[in-house]
């Protein structure tokens, strides 16, 4: 879902399409977006959190849960309600490795966050305070077990990835450590992004520019298919699939889209963006939204169209490293960065 922490991330999501090949034209010169009427549709809220916010998930328009580098969950049942509408709750307080890296909330009654110690923090009542979050070691990797990404398409499947090339899966996310399985699918290459639009499809990107797909994500290593050299210039740090028949991935200013995600590299089209994205959310086939390290918002109502269908404007937030975007519907998008939340009901 979110970009790997190994490089600057957070940029507004944009996916245009051009030919997918091993060589690409150089990136367009970076321009400085200026305030536009579109920018007026976005509101920047400064929170009191002192640790950079890493990720956000919004299962509905009435619930968003973000996580930060200090082990806190930031929860709101009114995401556009200003700073007072967000509550900071420490949920990852045990051990040395409490930096939360990502979160996925498939429903309002299940959220699963992952940290740099290989733990999943799970709650069936995310607004209920710290006591409702239960930590379990879910990654059996013996050494480098930092979990960088997680996606749960529903309450009976979660798929995460660590920095040692492993996928962790569970069909019972609330079941504690025994309910999770660790499978090496990518050697020792860090997994950077995961998107699972359903239990029958997961799309995974890694830090070497490889793409992995599976129609049976709990089926073991043989159920995962790797396309090497998919993104030759670097990693695939972002993935978003509005459906099993449409996926977008991004890395190092390349955005790829496919209506046949398991069809191999020929089934994906590629466009070169001006700057690497830090967050990507595509709630439907007619909307993608993202954010970059320069605090620009990029959006498209035709994300499989040409590069010209992607528009960029200044979102008004501070520059940052790391962050994310979540859009539960076309009527709400929530971006996070540093100690800020940027929201729009008309993205």
Image: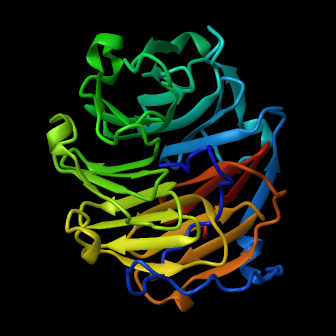
Observer able to see residue 235: yes
User: Is 286 positioned to the left or the right of 12 in the image?
Assistant: left
- The residue lying at 34 percent from left, 37 percent from top is 159
Q: Count every numbered label the image shows and give the total.
A: 0
Residue 344 image offset from top left, x and y in percent: 65, 62
Q: Is residue 17 above or below residue 231?
A: below
Question: On the image, which quarter does residue 170 sit in?
Answer: top left
Quarter of the C terminus within the rendering? bottom right
Q: Is residue 55 above or below residue 123?
A: below
Residue 5 image offset from top left, x and y in percent: 62, 43
- The residue lying at 20 percent from left, 37 percent from top is 221
- The residue lying at 82 percent from left, 58 percent from top is 319
Residue 289 image offset from top left, x and y in percent: 56, 67
Front residue (pair 280, 224): 224
Residue 270 image offset from top left, x and y in percent: 43, 78
- The residue lying at 81 percent from left, 59 percent from top is 317
Render colour scheme: rainbow
Q: Is residue 29 above or below residue 139?
A: below
Front residue (pair 115, 77): 115
């Amino acid at each position: 879902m979110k970009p790997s922490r190994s490089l600057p991330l957070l940029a507004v999501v944009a996916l245009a399409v051009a030919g997918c090949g091993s060589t690409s034209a150089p990136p367009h010169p970076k321009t400085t977006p200026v305030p536009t009427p579109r920018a007026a549709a976005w509101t920047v809220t400064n929170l009191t959190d002192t640790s950079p916010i890493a990720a956000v998930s919004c299962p509905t328009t009435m619930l968003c849960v973000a996580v930060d580098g200090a082990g806190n969950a930031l929860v709101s049942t009114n995401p556009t309600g200003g700073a007072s509408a967000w509550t900071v709750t420490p949920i990852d307080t045990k051990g040395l490795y409490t930096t939360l890296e990502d979160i996925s909330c498939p429903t309002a009654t299940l959220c699963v966050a992952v940290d740099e110690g290989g733990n999943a923090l799970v709650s069936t009542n995310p607004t209920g305070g710290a006591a409702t979050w239960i930590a379990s070691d879910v990654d059996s990797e013996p050494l480098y077990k930092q979990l960088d990404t997680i996606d749960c398409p529903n309450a009976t499947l979660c798929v995460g990835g660590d920095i040692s090339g492993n996928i962790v899966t569970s069909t019972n996310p609330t079941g504690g450590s025994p309910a999770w399985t660790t499978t090496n699918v990518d050697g020792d290459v860090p997994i950077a992004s995961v998107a699972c639009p359903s239990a029958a499809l997961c799309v995974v990107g890694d830090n070497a520019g490889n793409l992995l797909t599976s129609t049976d994500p709990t089926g073991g290593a043989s159920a995962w298919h790797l396309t090497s050299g998919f993104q030759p210039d670097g990693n695939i740090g972002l993935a978003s699939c509005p459906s099993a028949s449409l996926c977008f991935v991004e890395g190092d200013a390349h955005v790829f889209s496919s209506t046949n995600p398991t069809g191999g590299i020929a089934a994906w089209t590629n466009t070169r963006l001006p700057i690497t994205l830090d967050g990507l959310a595509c709630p439907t086939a007619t909307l993608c939204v993202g954010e970059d390290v320069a605090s620009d918002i990029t959006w498209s109502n035709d994300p499989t169209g040409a590069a010209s269908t992607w528009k960029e404007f200044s979102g008004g937030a501070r520059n940052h490293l790391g962050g994310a975007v979540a859009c539960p519907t076309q009527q709400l998008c929530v971006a996070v960065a540093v100690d800020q939340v940027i929201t729009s009901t008309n993205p």
